[in-house]
Amino acid sequence: MKTRTMVRHPLLAAALGATVVALPASALYLYGSGHTARAAGTPAVVASTPAPGVAPIAAGLPDFRPLVQAYGPAVVNVSVRSVVKTSGHGRMPPGMDEDNPLFQFMQPGNGAPMRGEGSGFIISADGIILTNAHVVDDAQKVTVKLTDRREFEARVIGSDAKSDVAVLKIDAQNLPVIKLGDPQTLQVGEWVVAIGSPFGLENSVTAGIVSAKGRSLPDDTYVPFIQTDVAVNPGNSGGPLFNLRGEVVGINSQIYSRSGGYQGLSFAIPIDVALNVSKQLQTQGHVTRGKLGVGIQDVDQALAESFGLEVPRGALVASVEKGGPAEKAGLREGDVILQFDGQVIESAGQLPSAVAATDPGKAVALQIWREQATREVKVKLGQTTDDNAVAANFDGTNAGRLGVMVRPLSAEEKQQADLSDGLVVENVDGAAAEAGVRPGDIVLSANGSPVKSVEQLRSVVSGSKSHVALLVQRGDARVFVPVELG
């Protein structure tokens, strides 16, 4: 994947809410589904044998009518009016021309009025509504339209950009409400249904299956997304994702696309995550999250062999924040976190959302892999703020062959890097370069053992079978690089 761009801003569509986004054909774009783009077709659905507990399939396909009739009235259209700052002469959005009837020319000046549309759903009969944060960002006025055509001006109670959840309130009573489900019981391959307002087309229904669970997306470490192949398009943002029992299991939030339109990859925020955020926004006006204070990366086959794991699993600790909860508990670089508070951690992407969902100050048990054995560590979690991370997720690199020229850090370099020891990479060649090691990198350890001299590094490498895991510091970031020895 060459280019991955996250775009998350309000649905600022001109006139009827349709802004054409001009995208390079070779680029991959990940963005909030509230953004406007050209729609693509819905993939065909192949009938399969229903899993236990799932509604029976009639005539090869499930009947969605009872679900839509029962809970469709609790899905709302969210219309947003905002102002975008402009300067100089008015200009058109990319890909549009003056003859386009959906185009509203921006007048020069301090701002241009813009309108956008998204979706939402009612969770309490007195007018509490959930939607996406990116739907109502910078909104000056939010209007909610019900299926019975009534319209209400909504108040934004709170919005949390990190989870992309917002809570609205309208002055109404005895409203239809959705039924809440448990995303933990959701199974891959299970049928799911989305209701929303794609391109402003209110109460549109689309269906598909759960493609995967617990997806970690760029810049979204707080949310273990539900991936589906349900047709989700601009305007579906904030709408509910139902299981066949009519229970909401997620909030449709993003799509992954080359063209800018739906291409079979849609992502929803699990409803339990959204409800936790909603509760905090309503009671305290902001969201607090647990903090572990580690930088992590996935364990691939090469790293698993380097650390003696039978299979690649867990979250590899690449850095430990000084003075943070993890350091106080004794966690080290090279530890592999296998369980967090009883939850099995199969991949690094699972850990940040698990930590974030845990109350700050709670003491939790971690099962870690260290020195080719499991052990338990107790950690009292801290609290995240906007300027620190739950657990930064660093990307590892592919393995190559060892081929580095190193030297010990000078006293001045130790002071500048705030390190007591390490080896500076002077030159890199062959597979080491392919693995991602660069001149100027500082090698801190090999296979979990600190290296203070060239002889120590040589000893670790000579004692390794097929791979060696180098802990490398580059700038302020640390990452394990697996190198295949051959």
Image (cartoon, rainbow, N blue to C red):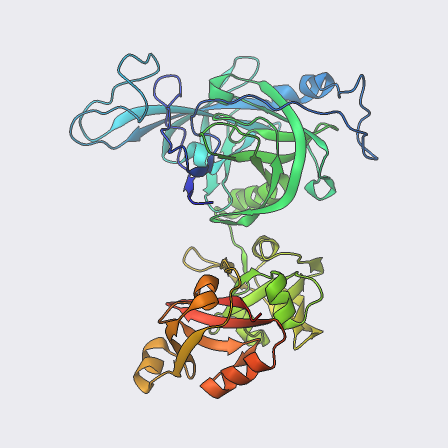
Q: Residue at x 42, y 84 (%)?
A: 420
Total marks placed:
0
Which is more toward the observer, 10 or 410?
410
Which is more toward the observer, 224 or 146?
224
- Residue 328 visible somewhere in the drawing: yes
129 relative to 365, above or below: above
Image location (x, y in percent) of residue 279: 57, 44
Image location (x, y in percent) of residue 151: 48, 17
Q: Quadrant of residue 14?
A: top left
Quadrant where the image shows the C terminus: bottom right
Q: Quadrant of residue 41?
A: top right
Q: Residue at x 80, y 27 (%)?
A: 55
Q: Residue at x 51, y 83 (%)?
A: 458
462 relative to 472, above or below: below
Image location (x, y in percent) of residue 7: 41, 38
- Residue 175 visible somewhere in the drawing: no
Q: Is 138 situated left or right of 464 in this image?
A: left
Which is more toward the observer, 8 or 57?
57
- Of all residues, the one furthest to the left in this rendering is 88
250 relative to 339, above or below: above
Image location (x, y in percent) of residue 270: 62, 41
Q: Quadrant of residue 107?
A: top left
